[in-house]
């Protein structure tokens, strides 16, 4: 089993920055993809950014140029640096790990990010 623990959410003003962290522990299979999803009230959970264990990253169009994903494979940790936050970024952000051989999804408990205008 794998546990994902997120931290770093909070309440900020538009234009501010936040950094989310997600630490994975347990029986972590490799290779894997780690990423961040978000879910706003009344909306579906959507992918924000992801990164393979080899460092290939992808981003949702809505966050390109503002958010940066990174990971420390030695620490099994993924980060999301969020700059120039907008009110529409308000959501619960979930950490995700997808193991590419066993094809199992793991989720964190979520962390709230609220951006006021």
Image (cartoon, helix red, strand yellow):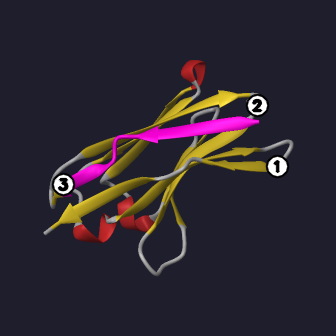
Residue numbers of the magenta segment: 1-12
Badge 3: residue crowd in 10 Å (few <14, some 14–19, many ≥20): some
> In the figure, residue 76 lies in which quadrant?
top right
Q: Position of residue 56 (x, y in %)?
A: 58, 41
- Identify which residue is drawn at 32% across, 54% down: 65
SS label for mark 2: loop
Q: Quadrant of the N terminus?
A: top right
Q: Position of residue 90 (x, y in %)?
A: 32, 65
Are the two marked residues, 1 and 2, in contact with CB atoms closer than 8 angstroms? no
Instruction: Determine if the magenta segment contains residue 6.
Output: yes
Q: Residue furthest right?
A: 102
Q: Of 64 and 79, which appears nearest the observer? A: 79
Q: Marks 3 and 1: which is nearer the front?
A: 3
* Residue wearing tag 2: 30
Q: CA distance from mark 1 to mark 2?
A: 11 Å
Q: Position of residue 42 (x, y in %)?
A: 46, 81
Q: Earlier in the sequence, mark 1 or mark 2?
A: 2
Badge 2: residue crowd in 10 Å (few <14, some 14–19, many ≥20): few
Q: Main secondary structure of the magenta part?
A: strand
> In the figure, residue 29 lies in which quadrant?
top right
Q: Compared to 38, does 105 lie above or below?
A: above
Q: Position of residue 28 (x, y in %)?
A: 73, 30
SS label for mark 3: strand
- Identify which residue is drawn at 78% across, 44% down: 100
SS label for mark 1: loop
* Residue wearing tag 3: 12
* Residue wearing tag 1: 103
Q: Horizontal placement of 33 versus 99: left or right? A: left
Q: Compared to 60, does 67 lie above or below?
A: above
């Amino acid at each position: 089993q794998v546990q994902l623990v997120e931290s770093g959410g909070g309440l900020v003003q538009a234009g501010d920055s936040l950094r989310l962290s997600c630490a994975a522990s347990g029986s972590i299979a490799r290779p894997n993809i780690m990423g961040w999803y978000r879910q706003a009230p009344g909306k579906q959970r959507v992918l924000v950014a992801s990164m393979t264990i080899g460092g290939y990253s992808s981003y949702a169009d809505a966050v390109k140029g503002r958010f940066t994903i990174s990971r420390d494979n030695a620490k099994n940790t993924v980060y999301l640096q969020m700059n120039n936050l907008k009110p529409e970024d308000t959501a619960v952000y979930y950490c995700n790990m997808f193991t590419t051989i066993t094809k199992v999804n793991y989720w964190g408990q979520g962390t709230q990010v609220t951006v006021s205008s």
